[in-house]
Amino acid sequence: MPSQDEAEAVNEDDSPPPVPPRAAPQQNSPASAAVPERRVKCVLVGDGADEFERLRPLCYRDADVFLLCYSVVLPSSFRSVTDRWAPEVHRLCPGVPIILVGTQCDLREDVQVLIRLADSQEKPVSGDDARLCARSIGAVTFAECSALTQKNLKEVFDGTILASMQHAEEAAWPRRHTLREKTPDKIKQLSETWWRKLSCIQSFDLQ
């Protein structure tokens, strides 16, 4: 996944939620995940080109969780997590949970990849280094996955959706509580049809 991805959950009746203007051409990949008593449908949208850097924050609006992703065999992408992406998220969306995700873990022991990294005096990003990074940026969790082998892929998205739901519910609770205090006889039970917005930043540096 060599681009910034934003996953947006849509209503259970398949109608899309309001979407802010996009900064770049979109690449949509439908996906879904089951969570307790609900099914969340997501659309992954890629728009992480550097030339749209000033417009990219428009996609962060109302985000409930961020995935900061790097390739375990591209150390420069790992460094970008702390140098670029984490500071940007903390500045623009303070308090929104972050999940650190290492991608392409199937290539960690690939001989050709190891040779290429050695030629550049580099090595794959270790799990220990990633955990230290996760703590330093205040991530709620860390995981490694592979799109090729599907290792941990479902767990990453399930965990992301659950983190999103928890954050959204915590943010909504004070508002609902205030409404109940003001108009207790007029408040109706919230509908089970809902949507959540997920943002995924890919910190790949391909140059």
Image: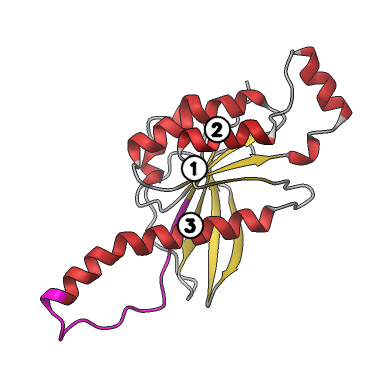
Q: Nearer the viewer, residue 102 or 199?
A: 102
What residue type is disc 1 on?
Answer: Ala
In this orientation, does residue 130 appear? yes
Q: Tag 2: residue type?
A: Cys
Q: Secondary structure at mark 3?
A: helix
Q: Earlier in the sequence, mark 2 or mark 3?
A: 2
Seen in the picture, residue 118 relative to 8 is either above or below; the reply is above
Residue at the far bottom: name it: 185
Q: How is the image coloured?
A: secondary structure
- Magenta-highlighted stretch: main secondary structure? loop
Q: Which residue is mark 1?
A: 139
Tag of residue 133 = 2
**Alpha carbons under labels 1 and 3: distance apart:** 11 Å
Cα–Cα gap, marks 2 and 3: 19 Å
Q: Left of 166 or right of it: where is 128? A: right
Q: Is residue 114 magenta?
A: no
- Magenta range is 181-198
Residue 67, given in percent of the width and then of the height, sits at 53, 45
- Point out the frontmost of discs 2 and 3: 2
Contact, mark 1 vs mark 2 (Cβ under 8 Å):
yes
Q: Which residue is mark 3?
A: 163
Q: In which quadrant of the rendered view does residue 78 lie?
A: top right
Question: Which element is circle 2 on?
Answer: helix
Residue at the (38%, 35%) spot, across then down? 55
Q: Residues within 10 Å of mark 1 (few under 14, many from 20)?
A: many
